[in-house]
Image (tube, helix red, strand yellow):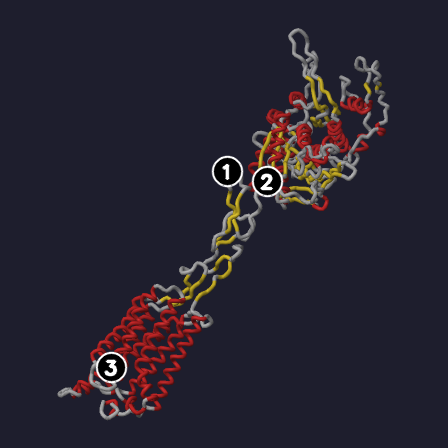
């Protein structure tokens, strides 16, 4: 079908859905190839292009003073016919030549709208693209056509299958369907879609395919039985079908035969609105189907244009077999003269051309989807041509800033402007092409509703689109969706249930990524998201909660005043301090008695004060370690004990000196152990320890430390000694004085005296040394707060040992045996002995 004009646009449509090839013989001329099976939607597609051109010609703002014409061809759903028609449009020649050198036919077109099949578009674009003739398809969706190097002049107003796949993946992700089956047609349409699904489903939607099956062309019962059996046995409740109507017809026959129900179907745009499948026989199985459909649009005036169709007005084809004539014959079941042989005899009617088209159910323009894409394709070519003709000389994009004119325009020049076209339709949709020739994609999401009366209604429940600013957007009205399940809720289709926070996914060996086990995070690690691949370690001072879903501060451990162990040690320390105060009070009260005055009462008072300091210094080891307590605890401990042991050492030396002085010639020994010398010796020995402590604190001071090595789930607060050498020297010096006191007291234990203090010193030093010898291995092998507890216990045990051994007998005599608290009794004279 043709219409003249200043500029001709071509169109390729499926007006017939089958063709009959002639038998080739060597004896006679072959019969011409014939197209059969009039396709009413395909004819409506062709007439939509005719309407769009007629509307543009009436528009004074678009292409003023330019008349568009068209040449529309039928591809008969056959590649060879569609390819031949495309070459005819590109060359402008018909099959017949005149005897002259000029040829008969239409002018070459500047652009083609079509083809409807991806395979046809691939074949056509491979050749036509060499001449840079722009082709704008309205129905070819194969993602392979986005290859700009192979198809430089191909454009389309329908989204590619790559976007359709991503749209389906978004729906799968929205409903949490991570486990689905895929059925595809055995052609470019299905194979490329399968490739996109396999590559994009995992990264984009976190899902995977339970199976992928090729649907056979034609009725193949054995193969269809096998495929449906796979569907029935699979745990995937969602089935995606990327195929054509004919595939679904054969497939559903087997689905009905095996009575496979409970599946959620997802339809590609090829069959999402197929009326042939919306039957009472199939809707119990296909009800609730979600499908991707071409964007529905509104084309004002198209219905009136279609109602004006008349064979008289459009009968301009020389062979008398125009599209309009065939439409008329198909619609009114008549034949134009001359009718086929036997038509009239069989009771057939002749067409008059006066039949009233309003009397038939035509046309239905309530659901314009492919037509809307055709409408946009024609307008895209028109806007590109309009932009090209509005070019001002000297500012053009071509050589020398030149512009194209209507008389000199070439096809590649129109393609340049087509790449940059950008307009908005009356329906509000923006039309432009990206670097691959694809328009801004948009799809409607359809839902098959099973009505109570058994009828089927296909309704729009959302859309998915990609804009230049917001990217891909999915919009769904879930309240409108019909679910063909008893629960009336979306089905659950997963291979493995989601792993909750606190666990990680562990892939099952030999299974797809969606099939996994949930493993609880190990201690110290968490996952705070669903379906985490890995558990993350908590920071150093944090630990995992019991649910392993968040980190909590680690429990702190130190020798606290509030725990039973700390309370016991604190009470014992205060008890020892109190006893020292009581003993000191007793000694002060009885300071004039012989037993107190014996062996320098001043040293006894100093010894009691030092023991009290020993008891009190143990409190520094209890409570949360701080810098000042860490620095003070060992220094106070070391100096207090050296003061204590120094007093004992001087007492022992005095005992030896006194008894040596009682022997002939020993009087001179006492002059070295007067009161001044005793104080000086104690001060000197204590000063040495003070110097050791000062050097230690200055060089490597003890500091508080958070230790996480003892317990992975606890922080042990402890004081790091800083310098092990300094700590060892401090303890070693105390030990040296204690051993020296023990040896001297041991030597004086048998000196004649009823109250020989050397025996008490020997016993006290034995206790002291035993405690501290046992302390070293116990301290080294005790972790955390127990090391502090061992040290406190050693301080308290040794302090109590000294207090009881040295002052217990004296207090016993003072309080309970006052008759023995005399000089004679102490010297061993009198009846009391």
**Res 648 seen here:** yes
Secondary structure of the residue carrying tag 1 is: loop
Q: Is residue 689 above or below residue 823?
A: above
**Residue 487 place in picture, x, y as percent:** 69, 45
**Residue 764 place in picture, x, y as percent:** 29, 78
- Mark 3 lies on residue: 758
**Residue 829 place in picture, x, y as percent:** 22, 91
Q: State the CA–CA distance, disc 1 to disc 3.
A: 85 Å
Q: Earlier in the sequence, mark 2 or mark 3?
A: 2
Q: Quadrant of residue 732?
A: bottom left
The tag on residue 179 is 2
In-front residue for pair 806/608: 806
Q: Is residue 282 above or below residue 32?
A: below
Residue at position x 81%, y 19% in the image: 335
How many C-alpha atoms fall within 10 Å of the one at disc 2: few (<14), some, or many (≥20)?
A: many
Q: Residue furthest top?
A: 27
Q: Residue furthest left?
A: 665
Q: Earlier in the sequence, mark 1 or mark 2?
A: 2
Quarter containing the N terminus:
top right
Q: State the CA–CA distance, disc 1 to disc 2.
A: 16 Å
* Left or right of 23 on screen, residue 663: left
Secondary structure of the residue carrying tag 2 is: strand
- Mark 1 lies on residue: 510
Residue at position x 34%, y 66% in the image: 778
How many C-alpha atoms fall within 10 Å of the one at disc 3: few (<14), some, or many (≥20)?
A: many
Q: Quadrant of residue 306?
A: top right
Q: Earlier in the sequence, mark 1 or mark 3?
A: 1
Secondary structure of the residue carrying tag 3 is: helix
Query: Which circle, 1 or 3, is nearer the viewer?
Result: 3
Residue at position x 34%, y 64% in the image: 780
How many C-alpha atoms fall within 10 Å of the one at disc 1: few (<14), some, or many (≥20)?
A: few
């Amino acid at each position: 079908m043709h219409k003249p004009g200043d500029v001709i646009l071509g169109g390729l449509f499926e007006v017939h859905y089958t063709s009959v090839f002639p038998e080739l013989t060597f004896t006679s001329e072959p019969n011409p190839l014939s197209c059969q099976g009039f396709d009413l939607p395909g004819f409506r597609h062709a007439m939509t292009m005719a309407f769009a051109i007629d509307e543009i010609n009436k528009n004074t703002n678009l292409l003023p003073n330019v008349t568009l014409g068209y040449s529309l061809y039928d591809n008969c759903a056959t590649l060879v016919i569609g390819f031949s028609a495309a070459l005819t449009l590109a060359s402008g020649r018909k099959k017949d030549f005149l005897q002259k050198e000029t040829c008969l036919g239409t002018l070459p077109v500047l652009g083609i709208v079509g083809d409807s099949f991806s395979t046809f578009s691939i074949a056509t674009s491979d050749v036509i693209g060499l001449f840079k003739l722009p082709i704008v398809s309205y129905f070819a969706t194969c993602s392979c056509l986005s290859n700009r190097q192979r198809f430089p002049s191909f454009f389309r107003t329908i989204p590619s299958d790559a976007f359709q796949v991503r749209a389906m993946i978004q729906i799968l992700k929205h409903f949490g369907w991570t486990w689905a089956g895929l059925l595809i047609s055995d052609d470019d349409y299905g194979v490329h879609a399968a490739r996109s699904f396999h590559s994009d489903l995992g990264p984009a939607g976190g899902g995977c395919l339970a199976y992928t099956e090729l649907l056979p062309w034609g009725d193949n019962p054995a193969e269809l039985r096998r495929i449906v059996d796979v569907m029935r046995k699979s745990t995937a409740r969602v089935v995606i079908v990327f195929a054509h109507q004919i595939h679904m017809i054969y497939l559903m026959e087997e689905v009905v035969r095996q009575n496979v129900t409970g599946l959620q179907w997802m339809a590609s745009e090829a069959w999402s609105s197929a009326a042939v499948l919306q039957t009472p026989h199939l809707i119990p199985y296909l009800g609730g189907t979600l499908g991707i459909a071409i964007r529905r649009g509104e084309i004002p005036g198209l219905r009136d244009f279609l109602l004006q169709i008349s064979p008289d007005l459009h009968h301009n084809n020389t062979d008398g077999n125009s599209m309009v004539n065939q439409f008329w014959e198909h619609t009114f079941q008549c034949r134009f003269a001359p009718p086929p042989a036997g038509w009239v005899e069989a009771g057939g009617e002749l067409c008059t051309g006066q039949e009233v088209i309003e009397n038939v159910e035509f046309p239905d323009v309530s659901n314009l989807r492919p037509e809307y894409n055709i409408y946009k394709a024609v307008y895209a070519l028109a806007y590109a041509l309009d932009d090209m003709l509005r070019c001002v000389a000297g500012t053009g994009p071509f050589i020398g800033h030149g512009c194209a004119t209507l008389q000199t325009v070439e096809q590649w020049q129109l393609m340049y402007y087509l790449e940059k076209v950008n307009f908005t339709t009356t329906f509000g949709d923006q039309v432009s092409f990206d670097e691959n020739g694809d328009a801004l994609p948009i799809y409607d999401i359809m839902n098959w509703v099973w009505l109570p009366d058994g009828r089927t209604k296909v309704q729009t429940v959302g859309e998915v689109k990609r804009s230049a600013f917001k990217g891909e957007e999915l919009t769904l009205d879930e309240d409108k969706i019909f679910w063909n399940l008893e629960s009336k809720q979306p089905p659950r289709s997963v291979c493995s249930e989601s792993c909750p926070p606190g666990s990680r996914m562990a892939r099952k060996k030999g299974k797809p990524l969606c099939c996994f086990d949930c493993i609880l995070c190990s201690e110290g690690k968490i996952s705070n998201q669903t379906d985490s691949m890995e558990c993350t370690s908590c920071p150093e001072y944090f630990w995992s909660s019991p649910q392993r879903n968040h980190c909590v501060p680690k429990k702190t451990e130190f020798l606290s005043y509030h725990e039973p162990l700390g309370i016991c040690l604190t009470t014992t320390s205060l008890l020892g301090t109190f006893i020292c105060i009581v003993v000191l009070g007793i000694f002060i009260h009885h300071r004039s008695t012989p037993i107190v005055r014996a062996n320098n009462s001043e040293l006894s008072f100093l010894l009691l004060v030092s023991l009290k300091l020993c008891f009190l210094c143990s409190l520094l080891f209890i409570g949360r370690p701080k810098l000042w307590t860490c620095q003070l605890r060992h220094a106070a401990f070391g100096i207090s004990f050296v003061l204590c042991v120094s007093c004992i050492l001087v007492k022992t030396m005095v005992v030896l000196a006194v008894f040596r002085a009682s022997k002939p010639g020993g009087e001179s020994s006492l002059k070295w152990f007067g009161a001044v010398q005793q104080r000086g010796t104690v001060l000197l020995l204590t000063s040495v320890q003070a110097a050791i402590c000062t050097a230690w604190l200055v060089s490597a001071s003890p500091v508080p430390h958070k230790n996480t090595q003892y317990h992975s789930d606890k922080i042990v607060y402890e004081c790091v000694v800083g310098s092990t050498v300094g700590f060892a020297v401090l303890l070693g010096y105390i030990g040296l004085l204690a051993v020296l006191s023990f040896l001297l007291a041991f030597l004086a234990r048998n000196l004649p005296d009823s109250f020989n203090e050397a025996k008490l010193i020997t016993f006290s030093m034995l206790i002291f040394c035993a405690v501290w010898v046992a302390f070293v291995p116990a301290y080294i092998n005790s972790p955390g707060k127990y090391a502090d507890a061992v040290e406190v216990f050693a301080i308290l045990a040794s302090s109590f040992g000294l207090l009881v051994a040295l002052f217990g007998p004296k207090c016993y005599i003072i309080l309970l045996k006052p008759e023995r608290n005399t000089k004679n009794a102490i010297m061993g004279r009198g009846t009391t002995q």
